[in-house]
Amino acid sequence: MKKFVFTLQTLYDVTISEEKQLKLKMKKIEERLTALVNGQRELERRFSDAKTRSAKEMLQGVSSDRLVQYGRYFEYLTDAMRAQQKKIHQTENERARCLQEQIAIKKKIRTYEKLRKSQYEAYLQEAKLEAEKEIGDIVSYQTATK
């Protein structure tokens, strides 16, 4: 009896490879997202600290030049936080797309595994029939020679 060979094995192997690549891609996206979120928190912390410092200085009396500096700094931080939030949003969208790709790949893999299982069951059935035929041939031969 010939050895079992899954007819779509190469496609299955390629799909498994794609799944591994998508997992690596997702890991990189997650790392980038974590870094962006940490950067956003840092900007928010800097904004809060500057706000606290400016409030203290206003209570003690502050020059107009210093107020203008604070105003510009707050604008800079606000713009930076908006840009960071935009990057976070884009990265989250990229993560969602990658997740959809992973779901599609998982479905493909499950389909290939079901096909493999059905082909293997057909192979086993064929092997069983062939074995029964050989046994029948042996019995017929032994009966004919007696």
Image (cartoon, grey):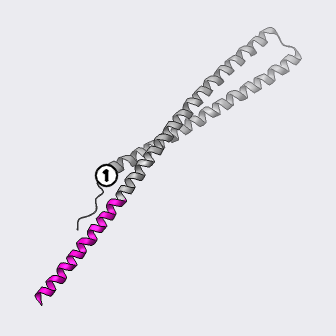
Question: Is 138 or 24 nearer to us in this picture?
Answer: 138
In the image, is 75 to the left or to the right of 93? Answer: right
Reply yes or no: does residue 123 show up in magenta. Answer: yes
Q: Main secondary structure of the magenta part?
A: helix
Reply yes or no: does residue 125 show up in magenta. Answer: yes
Question: At 37% from the left edge and 52% from the top edge, which residue is drawn?
Answer: 112
Name the kind of residue labelled 1 in the image: Leu
Instruction: Name the quarter where the C terminus is drawn.
Output: bottom left
Residue under label 1: 8
Question: Is 56 or 115 nearer to us in this picture?
Answer: 115
Decide: few, some or many residues near mark 1? Use Cα within 10 Å; few <14, some 14-19, many ≥20: few
In the image, is 116 to the left or to the right of 40? Answer: left
* Quadrant in which residue 44 is drawn: top right
For the view shown, which residue lies furthest in the bottom direction? 146
How many numbered circles are shown? 1
Percent x, y of residue 125: 30, 68
Question: At 48% from the left edge and 45% from the top edge, which residue is drawn?
Answer: 103
Q: Is residue 18 above or below residue 123?
A: above
- Magenta span: 117-146
Question: Tag 1's secondary structure?
Answer: loop
Percent x, y of residue 126: 26, 67
Percent x, y of residue 135: 22, 79
In the image, is 19 to the left or to the right of 45? Answer: left
Question: Is 7 or 60 nearer to us in this picture?
Answer: 7
Percent x, y of residue 55: 83, 20
